[in-house]
Every structure is written in structure tokens, then in C-alpha cells.
Image (cartoon, rainbow, N blue to C red):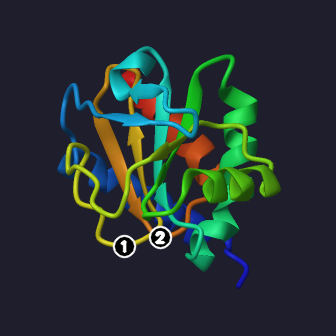
Amino acid sequence: MKLTSRKIDLKLLLLLMMSSAVAAEGADFAYPDLDGKIHKLSDYRGKWVVVNYWATWCPPCLEELPELEVFHDSHKDKDALVLGMNMEDIGVERLRGFVEEQFLSYPILRVGSRPSKTLGRVPGLPTTFLVSPAGEVVARQVGPINRETLESFVLNYKKKEE
């Protein structure tokens, strides 16, 4: 199904409305990546962080992976990055193989089937949180998200702060 600009605007408006509902200043967590290195959300203060909860068996999650990769690749050296939060009990080598097949370059963290609720509830997959450079959760999207929506939200939020 093709989204019209009106539907995209409505989706953006819903994200903006949710921003105050999911705000939690200074949220933090710590999870290992595929090599065992611990990543803390607080390590990324000063950048926008897209925290995306997903699983290999989730079709909508798989659809959004390329969008998240393009967003991450476009922003990682500037102002934003993506953290992929894998929510399943899967062997690290199997997960690593999947990540390589999908050509994902952003950090994939092993969360398991029960993530902390530090950022908020994860009622279904995929669920994406947007964390401001100050560490504040400013939005949550349950269901697939695309690069365009992320770009628009970050731009609009920056304008709102000016």
C-alpha cells in the first residue's frame, strides 16, 4: 500500500503528539552487541538515537531494515545513529549471519525476549523509540517506520527547539 503525503503527515503528527507521553529524561540501558561489547544508550549523548526493537521472524521488521540502514548510514558520522535491539533468544552466530545477509552496519544489540522498560513499553514488533541528543525519549512508533518519517521528525523537533 502506498502512503499519500496526507497519511505521512498524519503519522508524523501522531509521533509528535506521542513525544510528551513517552518523555523520560536521561533514559539509559546497557546491552551486548554481537561481539560481546556493551553499548549503553548514554554512550551516544549528543546524537539522535533511533532505538529499534525487532526480530528475524517479524515480516514488518524485515521490511524496515533497509530504511533504518539508509538512515544510519546517512547520519552516523554527523548527528544520529540506529541501535537495533534484537528481541529473541537466538544464537549469536545465527544472528550474525542474518545481519551480514541483510548488510546491516548499525550496532545490533542482544536484548532477548524481555527488554527492560527503560524507554517505555514494547507492545509489539517492530517498536521504535527516538531519543534526543540530551537522552530524552521524544517519540515511540509501534509498527514499521521509514527513513522519511525519521528525517521529518528529527527536522521538525529541531525547529521546535529553536
User: Of helix, strand and loop, which one carries label 2?
Assistant: loop
* Image quadrant where residue 142 sits: bottom left
Residue 76 vs residue 113, the one in the foreground? 113
| Quadrant of the image occupied by residue 125 | bottom left
Give the side of residue 41 with respect to residue 116, left or right: right
Q: Which residue is mark 2?
A: 143
Q: Residues within 10 Å of mark 2 (few under 14, many from 20)?
A: some
Crowdedness near tag 1: few (<14), some (14–19) or many (≥20) residues, C-alpha within 10 Å: few
Residue situated in front as seen by the camera: 10 or 151? 151
Q: Which mark is residue 94?
A: none
Residue 65 position within the rendered picture, expressed as x and y whole percent measured from the top left? 67, 58
- The numbered mark, 2 or 1, whose residue comes first in the sequence reads 1
According to the picture, the residue beneath numbered tag 1 turns out to be 124
Check the image and report above or below for 21 versus 160: below
Would you say the residues marked 2 and 1 are in contact, meaning their CB atoms lie under 8 Å apart? yes
Q: What's under tag 1, amino acid-wise? A: Gly
Give the mark toward the camera: 2 or 1: 1
Q: Residue furthest bottom?
A: 1
Calculate the distance from the C-alpha at mark 2 to the C-alpha at mark 1: 7 Å
Quarter holding the C terminus? top left
**Element type at mark 1:** loop
For badge 2, the amino acid type reads Gly
Q: Nearer the viewer, residue 129 or 158?
A: 129
Residue 19: x percent and y percent?
A: 29, 47
Q: How many marks?
A: 2
**Picture quarter with the N terminus:** bottom right
Which residue is painted at 19% across and 51% down in the image? 21
Residue 77 image position (x, y, % from top left): 69, 17
Could you tell me if residue 159 is visible in this image?
no
Residue 87 in view (yes/no): yes
Left or right of residue 151: residue 86? left
Where residue 76 sits in the image (x, y, percent)? 66, 25
